[in-house]
């Protein structure tokens, strides 16, 4: 029993190389195709991710079903991810290479339809994200960007922004001043 758990069916270096190669290949694929998936993770996207993990499993483990081999693969995946994250955030250039750039999907109150189509985004999904950031409609938007991480960043037009405490305090001060002038 212990022999089956601890005896790997392939050399350690082969396990490491297989794991790193599959990790890098999937990272590149997600970089090329995955921004919409990160922004709006749908049921279909979940199915793809689950099937993808099953498809690449044998490429990582090879003929090895040992506990030790599985743990080694997990350690290598986490280590490869840590290294790639540190490299990817070490400079603006590497961040742009690994992550990409934000994409403006709406500006001056209108959607950029071609960009939405290219990213595979539906208007009503984007509108829901705009609402969660304070815009009632796209007409309230000065600029909306899809970040490389898949999040939306929305800048509202001046007349669509909510009042701040400072705005309310200025109004109260003006009302107090008007009341004082009326009382005198």
Image (cartoon, rainbow, N blue to C red):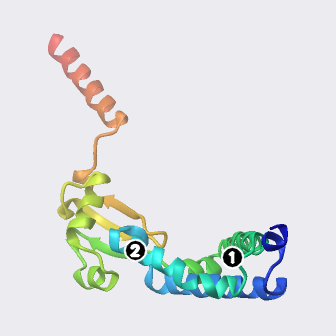
Residue 166 in the figure: left or right of residue 8: left
Mark 2 crowdedness (10 Å alpha carbons): few <14, some 14-19, many ≥20: few
- On-image quarter of the N terminus: bottom right
- Disc 1 and disc 2: Cα gap in Å? 26 Å
Say which quarter of the image contains residue 7.
Answer: bottom right
Q: Which residue corresponds to the image point at 79% horizontal and 87% vertical from the top-left?
A: 10
Q: Which percent across, then down, holds residue 165?
A: 35, 33
**Contact, CB < 8 Å: mark 1 with mark 2?**
no
- On-image quarter of the C terminus: top left
Q: Which percent across, then down, holds residue 154?
A: 34, 61
Q: Which residue corresponds to the image point at 33% horizontal and 67% vertical from the top-left?
A: 144
Q: Is 85 located above or below residue 129 in the figure? A: below
Which residue is at the far left?
A: 182
Q: Earlier in the sequence, mark 1 or mark 2?
A: 2
Q: Is 69 located above or below residue 159 in the figure? A: below
Residue identified by numbered label 2:
47
Q: Which percent across, then down, holds residue 122?
A: 24, 73
Say which quarter of the image contains residue 67.
Answer: bottom right
Residue identified by numbered label 1:
84
Q: Is 136 located above or below residue 87 in the figure? A: above
Q: Which residue corresponds to the image point at 27% horizontal and 66% vertical from the top-left?
A: 126
Mark 1 crowdedness (10 Å alpha carbons): few <14, some 14-19, many ≥20: some
Q: Is 136 located above or below residue 108 in the figure? A: above
């Amino acid at each position: 029993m212990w022999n089956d758990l601890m005896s790997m069916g392939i050399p350690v270096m082969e396990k490491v190389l297989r794991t790193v190669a599959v990790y890098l290949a999937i990272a590149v694929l997600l970089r090329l195709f995955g921004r919409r998936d990160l922004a709006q993770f749908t049921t279909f996207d979940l199915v793809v991710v689950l099937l993808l993990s099953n498809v690449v499993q044998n490429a990582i483990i090879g003929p090895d079903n040992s506990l030790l081999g599985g743990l080694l693969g997990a350690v290598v995946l986490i280590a490869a991810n840590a290294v790639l994250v540190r490299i990817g955030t070490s400079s603006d250039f590497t961040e742009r290479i690994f992550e990409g750039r934000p994409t403006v999907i709406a500006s001056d109150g209108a959607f950029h339809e071609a960009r939405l189509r290219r990213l595979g985004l539906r208007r009503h999904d984007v509108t829901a994200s705009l609402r969660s950031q304070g815009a009632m409609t796209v007409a309230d938007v000065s600029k909306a960007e899809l970040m490389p991480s898949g999040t939306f960043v929305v800048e509202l037009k001046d007349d669509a922004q909510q009042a701040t405490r400072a705005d309310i305090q200025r109004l109260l001060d003006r009302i107090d001043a008007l009341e004082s002038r009326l009382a005198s």
